[in-house]
Image (spheres, rainbow, N blue to C red):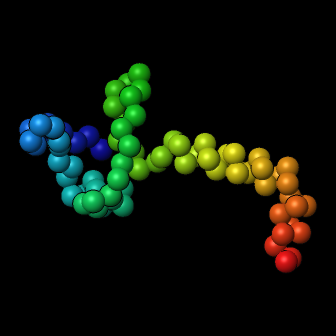
Amino acid sequence: MLAETTIRGIGNSAGLTIPKDLLDRQHLEEGDQVHLVETEEGLLITPYDPDFEEAMDAYEEGAKTYRNSLRALSDQ
């Protein structure tokens, strides 16, 4: 889908509106936090948090390494 919007001044910042049907399809609503990611193609607006993905990767690696210790702790 191609949607067009206008950047508007909001105090000392700027903002844009996103059409409701697009918000509905992306399961977003007013107050949701999104991340702005610069790409070679332009600006990506996403609810995906790259820092969270990095933290989950670290957790998964630790969970594999210390599997036996975590199992022993869960039995207590």
Depicted 76 relative to depicted 42: above or below: below
Side of 69 relative to 51 (left or right): right
Residue 42 on image: x %, y %: 34, 27
Q: In which image quadrant can residue 76 be found?
A: bottom right
Tell me where residue 44 sits by quadrant.
Answer: top left
* For residue 63, above or below residue 44: below
Residue 34 visible in this rendered orientation of the protein: yes
Task: Tell whether 37 sits left or right of 30.
Answer: right
Identity of the residue drawn at 61% across and 42% down: 54
> Which residue sits at x=41%, y=50%?
47
Which of the 4 image quarters holds residue 14? top left
For the point 89% across and 69% down, the residue is 72
Question: Of 11 and 4, which appears nearest the observer?
Answer: 11
Q: In the image, residue 9 lies at what x, y percent?
A: 9, 38
Along the line of sight, which residue is nearer the eye, 16 or 63?
63
Residue 22 is situated, as x and y percent measured from the top left of the image, at: 27, 53
Q: In this view, does 20 lie to the left or right of 57?
A: left
